[in-house]
Amino acid sequence: MEKIGIYPGTFDPITYGHIDVVKRSFKIVNKLIIGVANDHSKECLFSDEERVSIIKNALFKDLKFKSKDIKVLSFNTLTTTFCSKHKATIIFRGLRAVSDFEYEFQLAGMNRKLNSKIETVFLMSDPDNQVISSKFVKEIAKLNGKINNFVTKTTETAVKKKYD
């Protein structure tokens, strides 16, 4: 039976922390859609199209994930609407620290009120990846620091290109 999950986020850019959540999600689902949110309240370094491309390069080119198991799509609707459209019954959310929990808990509660058939599952990334955030990756890159321990090769190239 096909079990479909959605992992939504801005992924600006995708990091090894995000990728760890992707890997862990396959213990629960056999199909995953990475939903690249077009969040107008956040100022992103990359456009939606660029983020989709960066994620595909990171997963399929750099890390050799199976493209038949993962779709990468942008969306600008409610996450629950996006889930219903793609027949997903699980929303994956990554947690790095306790400080993430309050916001994520409220978001999960609202999503449940919007569609009680969709469950939210919180996944912790590996402790080595818990400190990684897209925000810090961009800050380090902007100041000419090394980001290769936080992102894949093609992602590193894309980020550095933005700051050259």
Image (tube, helix red, strand yellow):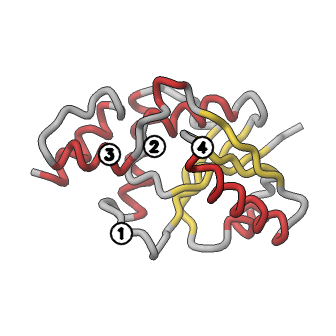
Q: Answer above or below: position of 108 versus 41.
A: above
Residue type, mark 4 in image: Val
Upstream in sequence: badge 2 or badge 4: 2
In the picture, measured across the screen, residue 86 lies left or right of residue 104, that is: right
Callout 3 secondary element: helix
Q: Which residue is mark 3?
A: 136
Q: Which residue is mark 2?
A: 56
Residue type, mark 1 in image: Glu
- Which quarter of the picture shows residue 67? top right
State the mark number for residue 43. Answer: 1
Residue type, mark 3 in image: Phe
Quarter containing the N terminus: top right
Q: CA distance from mark 2 to mark 4?
A: 30 Å
Q: Answer above or below: position of 125 versus 128.
A: below
Nearer the observer, disc 3 or disc 1?
3
User: 25 or 73, which lies in front?
Assistant: 25
Upstream in sequence: badge 3 or badge 1: 1
Q: Which residue is depicted at the point 49% across and 33% down?
A: 130
Q: Among all residues in the image, which is located at the extreme left? A: 164
In the picture, measured across the screen, residue 48 lies left or right of residue 76, that is: left
Q: CA distance from mark 3 to mark 4?
A: 18 Å
Upstream in sequence: badge 3 or badge 4: 4
State the mark number for residue 112. Answer: none
